[in-house]
Amino acid sequence: MFYKEDQELTMVVLSQPALNQCSLIETCKPTSLVTEIPVIDLSNHEANTFIVKACEEFGFFKVVNHGVPLEFMTKLENEALKFFKLAQSEKDTTGPPDPFGYGSRRIGPNGDVGWIEYLLLNTNTDVNSPKSLFTFHENPQVFCSAVDNYISAVKKMSFELLELMADGLGGIKPRNVLSRLLSDEKSDSCFRLNYYPPCPELQALSGGNMIGFGEHTDPQIISVLRSNNTSGLQICLKDGTWVSVPPDHTSFFINVGDSLQVMTNGRFRSVKHRVLADIMKSRLSMIYFGGPPLNEKIAPLPSLITKEEENLYKEFTWCEYKNAGYKSKLADYRLGEFEKSAGK
Ligand SMILES: C=C1C[C@]23C[C@@]1(O)CC[C@H]2[C@@]12CC[C@H](O)[C@@](C)(C(=O)O1)[C@H]2[C@@H]3C(=O)O
Ligand SMILES: O=C(O)CCC(=O)C(=O)O
Ligand SMILES: [Fe+2]
């Protein structure tokens, strides 16, 4: 279950140095309304149907019985914490991200900020990921292999999810029509470790909530998120209300990304989400963003449209979408300029 939050939110910018440039959300008190979060049990033979329903209604679901060993998650969590606990001066010598690398407070190139530190990595071994980042870690090799083991296991589960989606969408053939985009050796996927330090300054600001990661949709196909047991993640429902997602360190949370919304011609919803910082506890999340190869055309699957006029989107490649995305602010509606209704 997750809790609906008040819809009318006010953004305030604080002047205290510690909170410098970070945004506050006021009046985020849970109401009595509760919403059931879709939970997909991968051992259930009807999982394909439930996944499709969840992607249509929420663009978001939780996965249990996923087969990824818990030790892969906890190992990576512990190694990542060792990195984030290093002295700020050491971490700073590895930044700023361009877009890969270590970042603190600033998200993306266009002035977005949050109460966050992160490591953003490219999962494609052909591209030169800033593995030098790991050298500051007390045991770089251990950190590197924890990242590699985790990503391999999560990728495998992502292929399964995308194949179940193809089944659930009416048995689209071949059933790897979506998963092949992530399994392709040129897949432009990335991986992010987010660390949200506790924000004790919040205590003084009754009712205030510090933005850890501002509202946005993920541009890729799907994002697979795992976090420690600190809350903070919220998703936006179709009616515009924000709901808090109770954390579960043993499960994964899946976001439909913009590219999958387009490939299903709007049938699946790319979910708007955000993270609020906690007063007392740090949050550590790890997210695999499964993206297609750069030259891949992002267009509705032919079996999901009967006439070309029904296609809601202009033709574009992942590279074009990504480049446009990097010119945008986090909260911008990036798909807007690619909708046919936006004019040619
Ligand atoms: C403000 C930005 C950060 C972002 C690139 C962008 O210009 C717009 C999309 C942002 C986002 C959100 C999901 C992922 O965290 C991310 C890595 C991505 O692919 O798109 C980030 C980008 C980023 O932090 O570089
Ligand atoms: O850290 C989280 O829990 C979510 C962050 C997120 O949405 C992102 O990195 O795109
Ligand atoms: Fe996200």
Image: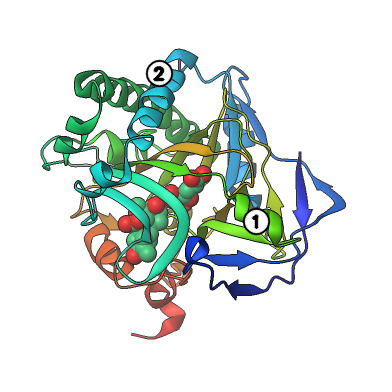
SS category of the residue bearing label 2:
helix
Instruction: Locate residue 308, reporting x and y percent.
Output: 40, 68
The residue under the point 25% across, 18% down is: 142
Q: Nearer the viewer, residue 331 or 276?
A: 276
Examine the rendering and report whether any part of residue 83 can be seen.
yes
Callout 1, which amino acid?
Leu
The residue under the point 16% across, 35% down is: 131
Say which quarter of the image contains residue 318: bottom left
Examine the rendering and report whether any part of residue 306 can be seen.
no
Residue bearing the label numbered 1: 202
The residue under the point 28% across, 62% down is: 322
Q: Residues within 10 Å of mark 2 (few under 14, many from 20)?
A: some
Instruction: Locate residue 156, reporting x and y percent.
Output: 36, 24
Of discs 2 and 1, which sits in the foreground? 1
278 left or right, relative to 329: right
Q: Earlier in the sequence, mark 2 or mark 1?
A: 2
162 left or right, relative to 232: left
Instruction: Locate residue 319, reporting x and y percent.
Output: 22, 60
288 left or right, relative to 292: right
Residue bearing the label numbered 2: 75
SS category of the residue bearing label 1:
helix
